[in-house]
Image (cartoon, rainbow, N blue to C red):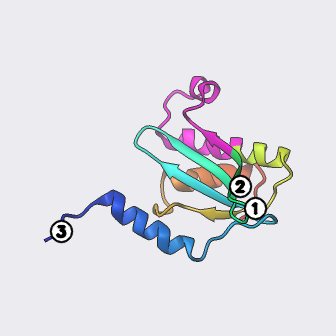
Amino acid sequence: MAKFNRREAREKRHQRLRKRVIGTPERPRLNVYRSLHHIHAQIIDDSIGHTLVSASTVEPELRAKLGSTGNKEAAKEIGRVIAQRAKEKGISKVVFDRGGYIYHGRIASLADGAREGGLEF
C-alpha cells in the first residue's frame, strides 16, 4: 500500500486547479507558495511564462521589518507588498492561485493583504 505524501497531494491539487486558473496579460496569476518558515508570492503572465512581480519573507528588508516570517501577520504584509509592487507595474486585476493549499490561515491573510493593497480578484 502506498504511503500518503502531503507534498505530492498538494502538487496534485495544484495541477487540478491550474487547469482552470490561467494568467493573461490583462489579468495575470497571483501564485502563492508556503513553507513552514516563509511565504512567497509571484504575479505571473502565463502567456509568456514570465514573473512580473514577486515578494517573499526571505527578502532581507522584509525579514528585518517582520518579527516572525511564518505567521499570518507576515503573510498579510507580503500581500500588501505584492499589491504595491503590482500597482507600480500597472497591474490592478489578478487571478488568485492558492497553489493547492486550503484557503485558510496564511493563504487567506495574504489574499486579504493584497486586497487591502488594491488588487482585485
Residue at coordinates 23% horizontally, 64% vertically from top-left?
4
Q: Position of residue 1 (x, y in %)?
A: 13, 71
Which residue is under mark 3?
2
As measured in the structure, the alpha-carbon distance from the residue carrying label 1 to the one carrying label 2 is: 6 Å
Q: Which residues are magenta?
A: 54-81
The amino acid type found where label 1 is placed reads: Glu
First in sequence: mark 3 vs mark 2: 3
Badge 2 crowding class, 10 Å Cα cut-off, few under 14, some 14 to 19, many 20 or more, is some
Which residue is under mark 2?
115
As measured in the structure, the alpha-carbon distance from the residue carrying label 3 to the one carrying label 1 is: 41 Å
Q: Furthest residue to the front? A: 48
Q: Position of residue 110 (x, y in %)?
A: 60, 50
Find residue 57 and report its image quarter: top right
First in sequence: mark 3 vs mark 1: 3
First in sequence: mark 1 vs mark 2: 2
Q: Nearer the viewer, mark 3 or mark 1?
A: 3
Q: Is residue 50 magenta?
A: no
Lateral position of residue 12 relative to residue 46, left or right? left
Residue at coordinates 82% horizontally, 48% vertically from top-left?
87
Residue at coordinates 52% horizontally, 27% vertically from top-left?
67
Badge 3 crowding class, 10 Å Cα cut-off, few under 14, some 14 to 19, many 20 or more, is few
Badge 1 crowding class, 10 Å Cα cut-off, few under 14, some 14 to 19, many 20 or more, is some
Which residue is under mark 1?
120
Which mark identifies residue 63? none
Q: Secondary structure at mark 2?
A: helix
Q: Position of residue 7 (x, y in %)?
A: 35, 57
